[in-house]
Image (cartoon, coloured by chain):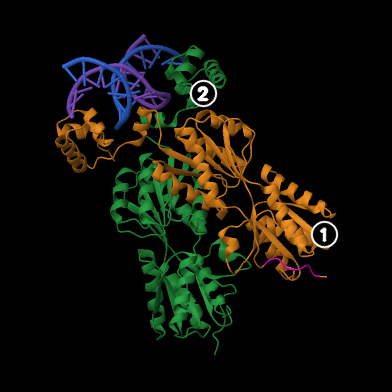
Chain colours: A orange, B green, C blue, D purple
Amino acid sequence: MHRPTMEDVAARAGVSRALVSLVMRDSPKVSPGRRAAVLAAATELGYQPHAIARQLASRSSTVLAVLVSDLLNPFFAEIAEQLETLALPEGLQTILGSGGRRPAGERRSVQTLLSFRPAGLVLLGPGVPASVLERASLVTPVVLVARATRLARVDTVNEDERAGSALAVEHLVGLGHRRIVHLEGGDGSQAALRRKGFADAVQRHGLRAWVEASEYTEDAGEASARRVLAGGRPFTAVVAANDVNAIGAISALEGAGLRVPQDVSVVGYDNTSLAALRHVGLTTVDQPSAELARLALESLLQRLRDGRTEPVRHLLHPRLVVRTTTAQSPP
Amino acid sequence: MHRPTMEDVAARAGVSRALVSLVMRDSPKVSPGRRAAVLAAATELGYQPHAIARQLASRSSTVLAVLVSDLLNPFFAEIAEQLETLALPEGLQTILGSGGRRPAGERRSVQTLLSFRPAGLVLLGPGVPASVLERASLVTPVVLVARATRLARVDTVNEDERAGSALAVEHLVGLGHRRIVHLEGGDGSQAALRRKGFADAVQRHGLRAWVEASEYTEDAGEASARRVLAGGRPFTAVVAANDVNAIGAISALEGAGLRVPQDVSVVGYDNTSLAALRHVGLTTVDQPSAELARLALESLLQRLRDGRTEPVRHLLHPRLVVRTTTAQSPP
DNA sequence: TTGTAAGCGTTATCAC
DNA sequence: GTGATAACGCTTACAA
């Protein structure tokens, strides 16, 4: 598996290695004749540039690294795809790392991605401690999506998730619901925001802030809904941690013989493709993945090209998408 | 953003750069005293090894590259996560590339991944031409999952998809269905196998091989089901291209006022988490993602460590998972 | 056990 | 325009 190098191409074309390098990066200062000769030699030999060596020598990278905390959550997968699409015309190639839903996994993944010295790093919903983010921000521009921070060198692109949770509550209260339970998405900072938005909103209406521990997965949604049912305390509505969590919760409810939305209303969060399935028709708070991706890349490019050093904090307004899992509260 | 190098660490610890290198790869032939000194210097300086440089110098890689043809298809996302989990204990760090469902995108992604000169490349359901795969196989061991090939240097891990499609047909015929339409997953080689399995099976039962063009996406499933409905020819069962395609088809059917499975039965393919949602309950042909991932990595390691050069072709037996989208044919 | 020195495949800086 | 030559940060014989 030995690959030809620039040296081989140069020898074959009868020129110096430096000239081959110029041709490869199509520099304007190469005579057409030589260029053609070099290109011919390159294809004959099946030469492929060695990005690793290039990067080491040029001390610069054209790689955009993206960490996806959970590949199985369509919300993150969608943003990742968007990012890749947008980055390409900017001359950035994307590589992905998966966190596998565990902070330890994310940390390793960040380490791996960083070891390639990418031009920038975008993290989608990461759960890693701030110290990891800070260290990363010393090496390359870092943008956080769906995660807040106070770190001075890190940009963030978020939706106002407190307001988003409140939207869900307002919707349910408007439908007459008074006993609403929130399934909380673990102990991350975003989950805390959603809980706070929920708690504030229900309390504004004189209702009790009923929160049940859960996670951002379908299994957790099912398990925690089951726990709520087992508790025996009556409820008519669920504000789930996110869409997949909501789907798990719906499974548990239906498994217990309850109908959604006639007996219990359920609201998700993220407005993933899952929620949009006609079969599911989940009422949910929209997070505009395309817009989040666009802003993330824009922030990165500003640091990269315009030399911005002040952090940027994007906070998008949430929007509720009403589908078929919410209805008037039963009497 | 200047990072300390081995040179800096060596200077600080009062040793040579080579010794630092040994410590970093924790070689046994370093005295405990020196090792401690080097490690101390490294942490004081915040030294982080430069994987790029290491790879260039050692002409070897610990990176496993994985190309995912479609991140939004949970089937591939699941395999990717599995691969990452399995590769880590083997000392391989995983990076992902996304093909974005387009061969052009895949090709670019393969290029990017290959430019890092990974220890191996696993492609999940790729649609790139064989020439791309062959070129890749000259640089690094290549394993194909959910895609067949005759290339001599490329391993494959597949399910017997002809048999899988046949299973779906047998199931439907057993339920009394006689007018079955297959939504075809595009013009890839795997889609052809599924179609062939379908056609052979229905013809064995003296039925007409009715195939409608589609794609491996939800939108395509919805669109093609709609076309079938518009065609006016009666049918009682659908063998969809895959799970997401099936879900799109179900949307179209329900949108037209048909009930699944009372009026029309639907079978998917892949047995993704989507199909398992209680809300969806899709009857589908299982593809064991964990097993596929395991075999893919095993094949790679055999080439890497044991020096195997003969290609390996894994062909798993399919299994039908019956859920709630299939029922007795209406009279 | 530790140090020296020669690469790895590029790019970048000069002269020519 | 073109070609030497020195980096880039690390690994790896080979010496000591």
**Circle 1 SS class:** helix
Dot 2: within a 10 Å radius of its alpha carbon, few (fewer than 14), some, or many (20 or more) residues? some
Q: Chain of mark 2?
A: B
The amino acid on which the numbered mark 2 sits, given as a three-letter code, is Tyr
**Circle 2 SS class:** loop
Q: Chain of mark 1?
A: A
* Quadrant position of residue A54: top left
* Image x and y of residue A74, in percent: 55, 55
Q: On the picture, is A296 further left or further right than A161? A: left
Q: Which residues are magenta?
A: A325-330
- Residue located 51% across and 31% down the image: A308
* Image x and y of residue C2, in percent: 45, 14
The rendered magenta stretch, by its main secondary structure, is classed as loop
- Residue located 72% across and 71% down the image: A259
State the residue in front, A95 or B288: A95
**Number of disc labels:** 2
Which mark, residue B47?
Answer: 2
Q: On the picture, is B127 further left or further right than B237? A: left
* Image x and y of residue B32, in percent: 54, 18
The amino acid on which the numbered mark 1 sits, given as a three-letter code, is Gly
* Quadrant position of residue B114: top left
Q: Is residue A251 visible?
A: yes
Tags 1 and 2 on a common chain = no
State the residue in front, B307 or A136: A136
Residue A327, magenta (yes or no): yes
Q: On the picture, is A126 further left or further right than B164? A: right
Relative to B34, residue A120 above or below: below
Q: Which residue is mark 1?
A: A231
Instruction: State how far apart marks 1 and 2 are (Cα).
Output: 52 Å
Residue A129, magenta (yes or no): no
* Image x and y of residue B241, in percent: 45, 69
